[in-house]
Amino acid sequence: MDESELEVKLRNTQYAIRNTVEDVAGLRPLRILMIAPTSFFSDYGGHIRILEETRTLQNMGHEVAIVTYYKGSDMPGLDIRRTAPLPWHTDYEVGSSRHKLAFDIYLAWQSLVEALRYKPDIIHGHMHEGALIGGALAKLLRKPLVFDFQGSLTAEMADHNFLDVNGRAYQWAYSLEKRIDKMPDAILTSSVKASRLLQDDFHVPPDRLHALPDCADPDRFNPEKFSEADKLALKQRLGIPPDRLVISYLGLLTDYQGIPHLIQAAARLKETGEKAHFLIMGYPSVVHYRQMAADYGVADRVTFTGKVEYRDAPAYLALGDISVAPKMSNTEGSGKLLNYMALAQPVVAYDSPVHREYLGDLGVYAPTGDVDAFTRCLVDLLHDPQRRQSLGQQLRQRAIREYNWHSAGEKIVSIYRQLTK
């Protein structure tokens, strides 16, 4: 057992002792109503944060009910309460949608119904729609509101090409975002960068801001759990040649996540004769990007798996020799990095404050949007196995030491307790 893992076990023991003291002191478990304006659970991004926060709070003895859209996977052990389906629109894509207003109206009604039934101590809204709905409920029920901020609302809508940053609708949405950001009693941000954004651009009082970066699960995402034989068998199933090093990505497949840049990098590596294979996991738009790979002549160098269930993510990600983070948003979190780190994989990323916050000096960075530089970073690592191993091991220790859910849970509950005094 290494030093970092020993530190985590020591913290867990201390936490158990403190739990006992709290029980003796009469601090009862809290009831938390989470509002998740998304199709929870789906295997990407902010859903992982909601899942892990909920599991952590439950493990600490608290009750959590999640109100969410009618679609999504039911996760074992979670209390998930869904809206009714829209009668005229039973299917929809990930991200911004013209129908999302209707989804949120349904969610607001269901949240009111569940709040009256559940009688929560805390309302915990995820994303801006959750904070807006939660703010109305918090005022009605006279309960504190905690806002889980995972990125700027208007920036995300612009990233999805749903709003024109020069248009009137964008200015209206920006004004609404500012109002929502002033509603909560406390805001949990997925990065220090996000806290600064809220303070500087949206003028949120700093005493309401609490940086709570995404965390890793080093037990599930443990490279030692996957033997070479198991990895070889999975590679064969996926059609990945055994003599190629694997460059892996898991997340949403969208342009702003940098998927076209990965395909372009694959084309450059193929031109120079590098024995590398891209494993791109996630959804939506798989058919679109598969065709793009064919157009670039790298259909034989890129494997698209489509959706990978969260339970299977560690085994698939373990195939990677290098992981990549070509995301081009400067406001959203990037929790996928923690899973890469926990699996002891070196990471090539576009240079952004959020990426640097997680990776520190251990990341391999390229200027945002510079595909040639990104490709050169990949080539350097492909030819340096010793550096790949060293960076990967250091990143795993960093994840264990600085980004663990037990410490995050303690911080969340401490904020809850302060607000419910």
Image (cartoon, rainbow, N blue to C red):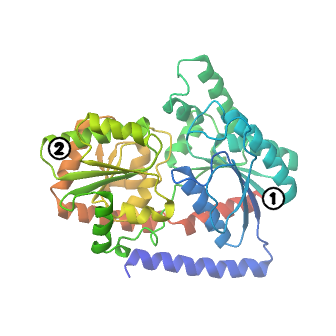
Q: Nearer the viewer, residue 7 or 39?
A: 39
Residue type, label 1: Pro
The residue positioned 76% from the left and 38% from the top of the image is 105
In the current view of this chain or complex, which residue is farthest to the left?
A: 273
Image side of residue 308 versus residue 297, left or right: right
At numbered mark 2, what does the secondary structure look like: helix, strand or loop?
helix
On the question of residue 138 being in view, the answer is no
- Residue 298 in picture, x, y percent from top left: 24, 42
Q: Left or right? Give the position of 132 relative to 198.
A: right
The image shows residue 368, relative to residue 244, as above or below, that is: above
Where residue 44 sits in the image (x, y, percent)? Answer: 51, 51
Against 7, residue 231 (above or below) is above
Q: Could you tell me the amino acid type at mark 2?
A: Lys
Q: Are there few (<14), some (14-19), or many (20+) residues within 10 Å of tag 2?
A: some
Q: Image quarter for residue 98?
A: top right
Which residue is disc 2 drawn over? 270
Tell me the residue at 38%/68% (across/down): 397
Task: Using the rendered image of the protein, determine whether residue 28 is visible from the camera's viewpoint.
Answer: yes
Number of labels in the image equals: 2
Reading the image, the residue beneath label 1 is 120
Name the front one of labels 1 and 2. Answer: 2
Question: Residue 388 location in percent, x, y?
Answer: 24, 61
Secondary structure under tag 1 reads loop
Quadrant into which the C terminus falls: bottom right
Q: Position of residue 102 (x, y in %)?
A: 72, 35
